[in-house]
Image: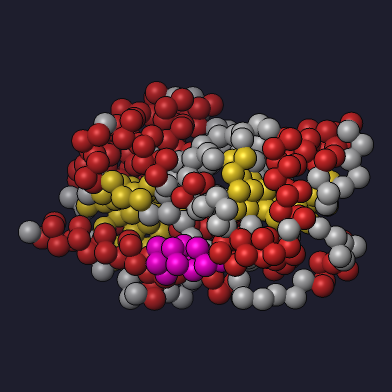
Amino acid sequence: MKILFLYDFPLWGSGSGTYIRNSIQELVKLNYKIGIVCPEERRFLADKIKQYRVTPPQIPIFVGHPELKGAKKYSELSEREITDVYKSYLDTTLEAVANFEPDIIHVHHLSLTNWVTRYINALKNIKYIITCHGSCLYNILDDKRYFPLCEDAVKAAKAITVVSGDSRIKFLKTFGRNYNKNLYIIPGGVDINLFPPQLNTSAIDKKYKIKDKKIILFTGRLTSHKGVKYLVKAAKDINGEVFIIGGGPEEQYLSSLVDRQGLKNVHLLKYMSGQELINFYYRADIFVAPSVWDEPLGLTILEAMAAKTPVIATRKGGIPLLIKPGYNGVFVKTRNSKKIADACNKLLKNDDLRKKMGENARKTVEEKFTWKKIALKFHRLYKRICKNHKN
């Protein structure tokens, strides 16, 4: 079967990009023929998939993207800019369809790419599915210009997938409960091969001079939605070193907050990826996710859990799909620095509890959130769609 992916961002630098890359890698192992349309210079699985590069006049964003600094938000585009971006995706996708001849188009995000897919469906009767990653749903609710054509695309889709139960609720509230039977929850996952059962983190200890110290970690984009300022404000009462890894519009504000409060136990590191980031996940005693918005899922939380690190998080969005209180983590109230500090100190004092929660966190990932399991869900969905289409 041939699946053509359609994506409006670069493949690196966001959770949805990670979702797509890992899904494709597993689908290739299941003998799918894969093509992808996206604005990405770097080749991805060049010997195994067909990649068609879009060159739009600009790449709009929903919230933020570390590889697209200074990019306009979708809500900031003029009608002329919306049209020009749409045309660039349409031209490249038409070329890809003619060359690749897909059985299904799998479009990610409720955005201009949905319009493209719907147009091609009308011309060529190629069936398609839509994956909503959460942030795209907020965009069309905030800017009604995108809603009518996205709604039309949703109506003609053979299936819609969302990454969490919370996103499912919001989708049905937005488009109507009549889509209930056509809506599937397929969350993100973790490449478990990158997370061995044990990992030596002495290099991190030496580089950052943290041997024998208790470490609290946050990683992710530094936006107001992530609520990192509440972790920083909690740090004065936390009996450990707080490491914040990432970049974004809140970076300067957080740095000034650290300075104003005279915090010596808060360390702001730049955006990090690869093995050093994985080492930090393992070295951390606790991972804190203090989100103040409805987080679609939380891939950094899953990565921390894969490294056997218990999680303290707010009960927002899709996070409750991952965390079971007292089993693999702890929930705290939103925007409450005192509760964050209290929860951190309680876990830091109890090594046995922390270790048990970490083991359970890893077990949760292995049982429910590996990319192989996620790809198998799409495999079953693709097969069902093609079978129903033929009938």
At which x and y percent is residue 19? Answer: 48, 57
Question: Residue 298 at x, y = what percent?
Answer: 54, 49
> Where is residue 304 drawn, in percent x and y?
62, 59
- The residue under the point 26% across, 64% down is 380
| Residue occupying the point 70% across, 41% down | 340
Q: Is residue 118 left or right of residue 292?
A: left
User: Magenta segment, principal secondary structure?
Assistant: helix
Q: Nearer the viewer, residue 3 or 294?
A: 294
The answer to whether 367 appears left or right of 344 in the picture is: left
Q: Is residue 366 magenta?
A: yes
Which span of residues is magenta-colored? 362-374
Q: Is residue 93 magenta?
A: no
What percent of the width, then of the height, locates residue 291? 61, 39
Asked whether the viewer can see residue 94, the reply is no
Q: Quadrant of the C terminus?
A: bottom left
Task: Give left or right: position of 178 versus 357.
Answer: left
Q: Is residue 255 visible?
A: yes
* 51 versus 314 height, above or below: below
Left or right, 59 with respect to 111, comes to: right
Q: Looking at the image, is 147 positioned above or below residue 348? A: above
Residue depicted at x 17% and y 50%: 125
Looking at the image, which residue is at 79% across and 49% down? 242
